[in-house]
Image (cartoon, helix red, strand yellow):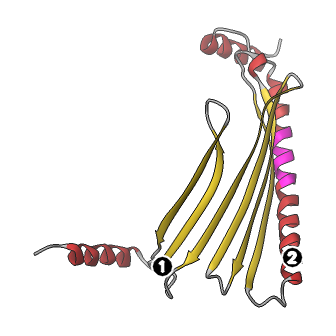
Amino acid sequence: QDPNEMNYQVFGLIVTNSFLPEQSNALLNSQYATGINTVSELLANQLSRYLTELVAEVFTDVSFISGVDFDLAYNYFENTDLTNIENSYIGNEFQFNSSLRLIEDKVVLRLGGNYSQTRSDGLVNNEFFTYDVVLELVLTQDRRYKLRFYHRTEPEFAGGLQTRTGIGLVYRHQFDSFEELIAGIRSAEKAITFK
């Protein structure tokens, strides 16, 4: 009897060749997820700032510690499969990142973790914990060159976790304008041109 609902179902029949779940439930679930994520982001930001200030206050007298930062996050997500409601799932994700800067920011240690869990029909389908460890050492006075060591785990598409370990050399240069960037590229080209 509702023309909007009828149009919605006709659209579902044309596109997916089946009826769609009621539009009001999908909209309510979407608003629910948005509300949870908005409130959790606000709380996580406040908690991260409070934790950073608290730990920084504890280490104020330690001369070799330049700074400490914490970043916490929580996300609620859901995937509603409109063609097959049995493929729908909900999930939670907790993230933690921290950085410890030492010796006037010449050494930076970053630690992070991510816990994710998805459920369908009340059963846990997928659950994993990943972590990230990065150590950066500043090599030059102008801070353009850094040596980076890292060890991290990442989820694979086929399931399971993949571990990556490596070392790299990082070069960083900042430009104040686009023209300065172009001039820097041209001078670099002239420097490496062989005559």
Magenta residues span 32-40
Choose top left, top right, bottom left or bottom right for residue 9.
Answer: top right
Percent position of residue 139, x then y:
51, 80
Q: Are marks 2 and 1 in contact (CB under 8 Å)?
A: no
Residue 55 tag number: 2
Q: Is residue 61 shown above or below 137?
A: below
Percent position of residue 103, x then y:
67, 86
| Chief secondary structure of the magenta portion | helix
Q: In the image, is residue 36 part of the stretch drawn in magenta?
A: yes
Residue in the foreground of this view, choosing between 105 and 53: 105
Between disc 2 and disc 1, whose residue precedes?
Answer: 2
* Residue position marked by numbered label 1 in the rendering: 144
Percent position of residue 77, x then y:
78, 38
Q: In the image, is residue 109 part of the stretch drawn in magenta?
A: no
Residue in the foreground of this view, choosing between 36 and 73: 73
In space, the residues marked 2 and 1 are separated at their CA atoms by 29 Å
Residue 40 tag number: none
Choose top left, top right, bottom left or bottom right for residue 132.
Answer: bottom right
Q: Secondary structure at mark 2?
A: helix
Q: Amino acid at mark 2?
A: Val
